[in-house]
Image: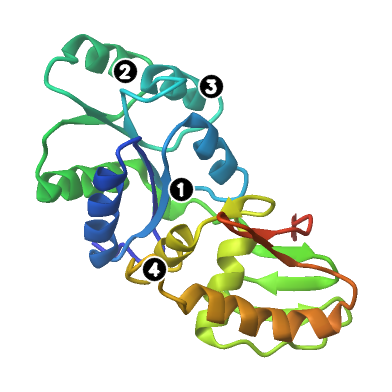
């Protein structure tokens, strides 16, 4: 099965599970978005339409059943529940309110992959038209699929592949403080030593290309002991 450009959203409060599952699925050709709770999920869904959601039942704050019910009120995206062995009643309720399948923890990554592929085949997601991935921000227009950035006047802004990946990460998560580790993960780079300077160097390079074109703007703000914040208002355009 061709999994190119299929996006999986994983919602689980265990960072180790998120990291391991995301790493495995990326190696299988999927794009990944990661959330630790319902609030983070809502932020991601403002900008990304996933092809499938992997949802843990036991979450802090709003639990998985509530999230599943809420998602089903206005979305048809396939939902795969993750549950502990003792949560059989919750699994049944989850299926009744609209979940498509479930996997019991601890699970084999291969089993999870097989369930995901089966759901994607059944959902017929390939027949749906993808969302436009063109965005405007502070005098710039970015086409994420064509990997092009230009000014509002049509002048191209040349970026390296790594710089464009970083910009994409910011565009899809505007006005959120992103740690260096999150940025490394979301740009599909190996999570390395927390003192690694890769992100800092890339941010510096990106600033040098954007700031001269928009003088007086602070497009990427440094947050002390936090990471980086993409400050512009981002709008999706046709």
Circle 4 or circle 1, nearest the eye: 4
Tell me if label 1 and label 3 are in contact, CB under 8 Å.
Answer: no
Q: Earlier in the sequence, mark 2 or mark 3?
A: 3
The first of marks 4 and 2 along the sequence is 2
Local secondary structure at mark 2? helix
Question: Residue 233 sits in which quadrant?
Answer: bottom right
**Does dot 1 land on a helix, a strand or a loop?**
loop
Kind of element beneath mark 3: loop
Dot placed on the residue nearer the N-terminal end, 4 or 1: 1
Report crowding for label 1: few under 14, some 14 to 19, many 20 or more residues within 10 A (C-alpha).
Answer: some
Left or right of 116, for residue 222: right
Q: Which mark is residue 50?
A: 1
At x 37% / y 23%, what residue is drawn?
64
User: Which of the 4 image quadrants contains residue 97?
Assistant: top left
Residue drawn at point x = 59 percent, y = 41 percent: 43
Gap in angstroms between the C-alphas marked 4 and 2? 31 Å
User: Which comes before the other along the chain, label 1 or label 3?
Assistant: 1
- Give x and y (percent) for residue 164: 58, 78
Report the residue at 45% width, 58% height from top: 182
Judging by the rendered image, the residue that carries numbered circle 2 is 94
**Element under label 4?**
loop
Residue ID for mark 3: 73
Label 1 and label 3: CA atoms lie apart by 16 Å
Distance between the Cα atoms at labels 4 and 3? 32 Å
**What residue is pinned by disc 4?**
188
Across and down, in percent, residue 146 comes to 59, 78
Q: Are marks 2 and 3 in contact (CB under 8 Å)?
A: no
């Amino acid at each position: 099965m061709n999994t190119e450009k299929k996006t999986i959203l994983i919602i689980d409060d265990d960072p180790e599970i998120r990291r391991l599952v995301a790493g495995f699925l990326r190696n299988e050709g999927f794009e990944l978005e990661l959330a630790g709770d319902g609030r983070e999920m809502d932020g991601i869904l403002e900008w990304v339409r996933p092809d499938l959601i992997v949802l843990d039942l036991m979450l802090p704050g709003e639990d998985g059943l509530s999230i599943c019910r809420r998602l089903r009120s206005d979305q048809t995206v396939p939902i795969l529940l993750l549950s502990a062995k003792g949560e059989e009643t919750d699994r049944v309720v989850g299926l009744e309110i609209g979940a498509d399948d479930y996997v019991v923890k601890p699970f084999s990554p291969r089993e999870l992959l097989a369930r995901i592929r089966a759901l994607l085949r059944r959902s017929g997601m390939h027949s749906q038209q993808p969302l436009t991935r063109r965005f405007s921000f502070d005098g710039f227009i970015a086409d994420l699929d064509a990997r092009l950035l230009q000014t509002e006047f049509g002048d191209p802004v040349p970026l390296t592949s790594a710089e464009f990946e970083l910009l994409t990460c910011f565009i899809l998560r505007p006005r959120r403080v992103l740690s260096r580790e999150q940025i490394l993960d979301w740009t599909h780079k190996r999570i390395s030593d927390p003192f690694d300077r890769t992100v800092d160097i890339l941010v510096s390079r990106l600033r040098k290309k954007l700031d001269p074109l928009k003088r007086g703007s602070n497009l990427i703000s440094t947050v002390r002991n936090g990471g980086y914040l993409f400050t512009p208002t981002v709008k999706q355009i046709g």
